[in-house]
Image (spheres, rainbow, N blue to C red):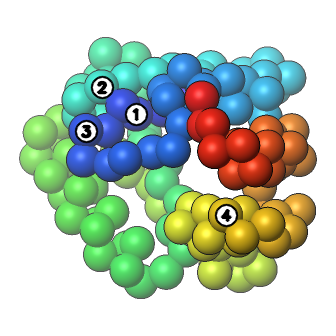
């Protein structure tokens, strides 16, 4: 399952619906992946979905500090749900949404920085200034 959050603390460029569409285009052909929107606590969504493990990707130590704290809080809230961390391939360690946005904003090449299935949509969004 890929969970896509409507996070009130963040200001994403794209709506939840558009991000769901992007995820479907990237993962839609994989039969055992379900793309699910949610609002609120990830741990509550995990419990509602009968998930036993939350998998988080880490790029750097700064990611680990935040995600470790969240994993500990989740463990307190729902002791039966585990959190597992996967380290990124070093060739992607520098990658962040902020970096991709900055490159795209100035017309730089984002090939290899985003999935090919949505690359053109992102380029067009920055050219037109329309993100939904």
Q: How far apart are marks 2 and 4 (CA)?
A: 28 Å
Residue at the spot of label 4: 105
Say which mark, if any, is on residue 8.
3
Regarding mark 2 in the picture, which secondary structure is present there? Answer: loop
Identify which residue, 14 or 23, lies in the foreground: 14
Q: How far apart are marks 3 and 4 (CA)?
A: 24 Å
* Mark found first going from the N terminus, 2 or 4: 2
Q: How far apart are marks 1 and 4 (CA)?
A: 24 Å
Q: Is residue 91 above or below residue 69?
A: below
Local crowd size for mark 3, using a 10 Å CA cut-off: few (<14), some (14–19), many (≥20): few
* Mark found first going from the N terminus, 2 or 3: 3
Question: Which mark is nearer the camera, 2 or 3?
Answer: 3
Regarding mark 1 in the picture, which secondary structure is present there? Answer: strand
Question: Which mark is nearer the camera, 3 or 4?
Answer: 4
Residue at the spot of label 2: 39
Q: Is residue 4 above or below residue 75?
A: above
Q: Where is residue 113 in the image (x, y as percent from the top left)?
A: 78, 64
Regarding mark 3 in the picture, which secondary structure is present there? Answer: loop
Q: How far apart are marks 2 and 3 (CA)?
A: 9 Å
Regarding mark 4 in the picture, which secondary structure is present there? Answer: helix
Residue at the spot of label 1: 5
């Amino acid at each position: 399952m890929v969970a896509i959050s409507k996070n009130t603390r963040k200001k994403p460029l794209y709506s939840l619906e558009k991000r769901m569409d992007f995820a479907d285009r990237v993962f839609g052909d994989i039969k055992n992946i379900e793309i699910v929107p949610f609002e609120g606590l990830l741990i509550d969504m995990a419990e509602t979905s009968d998930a036993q493990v939350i998998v988080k990707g880490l790029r750097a130590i700064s990611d680990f500090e935040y995600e470790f704290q969240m994993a500990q809080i989740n463990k307190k809230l729902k002791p039966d749900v585990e959190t597992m961390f996967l380290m990124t391939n070093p060739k992607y360690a520098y990658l962040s949404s902020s970096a991709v946005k900055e490159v795209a904003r100035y017309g730089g090449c984002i090939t290899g920085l985003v999935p090919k299935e949505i690359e053109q949509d992102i380029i067009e969004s920055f050219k037109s200034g329309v993100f939904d």
